[in-house]
Image: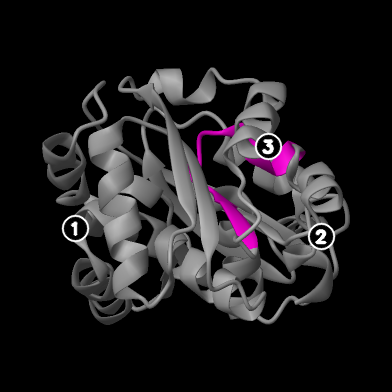
Amino acid sequence: MNGQDGGMWRDDILGWRGRIGLIMPATNLLLETALPRMAPDGVTFHTARLTNSPSVTPEALKEMSGRIMGAALDLASAKVDLIAYCCTASSFVEGRAHDDHVIADITDKAGVRAVTTMGAIVAALRALNIKRPVIVSPYAHAIEVLEAKYLEAEGFQIAAKAGMGITDMLGLHDPTPGAVYKLARETFVPSADGLLISCNALRAHVVADALEKDLRVPVVTSLTATLWGALRAIGVNDAIPGYGRLLTEH
């Protein structure tokens, strides 16, 4: 390959609109396969994985988050434009102050702008004017409660919530989109003005559009919020149809 061809290869393939670094649990199988399919041309994704416990517990999630900075420094060496910390539960288990610290630490020490999934979720709910969301997740009750607490501290009123009781990190991928859709319909209450489906391992993005049509309220998922937050942070504003109004209207 000559020098000119090498330059074209870099310009055409390696994120000519933006390179987004993803920090995720080592067990996550969805983000690095789904996001490139959803994102507009010219945006690439580059991952760093955090060794994690096989169990979804507050203690295990806190222990995993201690490895965030090492992953951020690895991604910074790839000259990414933004780093997204992509573990919903890890963020809300430790609270907003910890999330803010993660963003500041990555920005200061790795020299790269940063977002988190939970921060993107909060911004997405506000962008869609959702004040009373229903929350659906794959988590066990103890984890569910911490997510509700995080959102209540941000000023949201939780209209209803339901989890699937999954305590295994790989098992978070198991629910089918149909099962997610069914639980969301069963949990939804008329007093709610929106729906949040939490967890970046859950294939909720596949049914977000259908749920919006059937429930007649906006739907946010961890994955759609992460993509939206990351793209808008790097100035990419394309409408992406098929995954709910967050990615088409905001």
Residue at horizontal 73 percent and vertical 66 percent from the top: 246
Which residue has dot 2 on it? 40
Q: Secondary structure at mark 3?
A: helix
Compared to residue 201, the image places residue 5 above or below, namely below
Residue at horizontal 72 percent and vertical 62 percent from the top: 218
Closer to the eye: label 1 or 2? 1
Mark 3 → mark 2, Cα distance in angstroms: 30 Å
Quarter location, residue 131: bottom right
Where is residue 238? Give x, y as percent. 83, 71
**Figure quadrant of the C terminus:** bottom right
Compared to residue 135, the image places residue 238 above or below, namely below
Magenta-tinted stretch: 194-206
Mark 1 → mark 2, Cα distance in angstroms: 33 Å
Which residue has dot 1 on it? 94
**In-image side of 138 versus 190 (left or right):** left
* Amino acid at pointer 1: Glu
Which residue has dot 3 on it? 185
Quarter location, residue 41: bottom right
Quarter location, residue 204: top right
Q: Is residue 112 magenta?
A: no
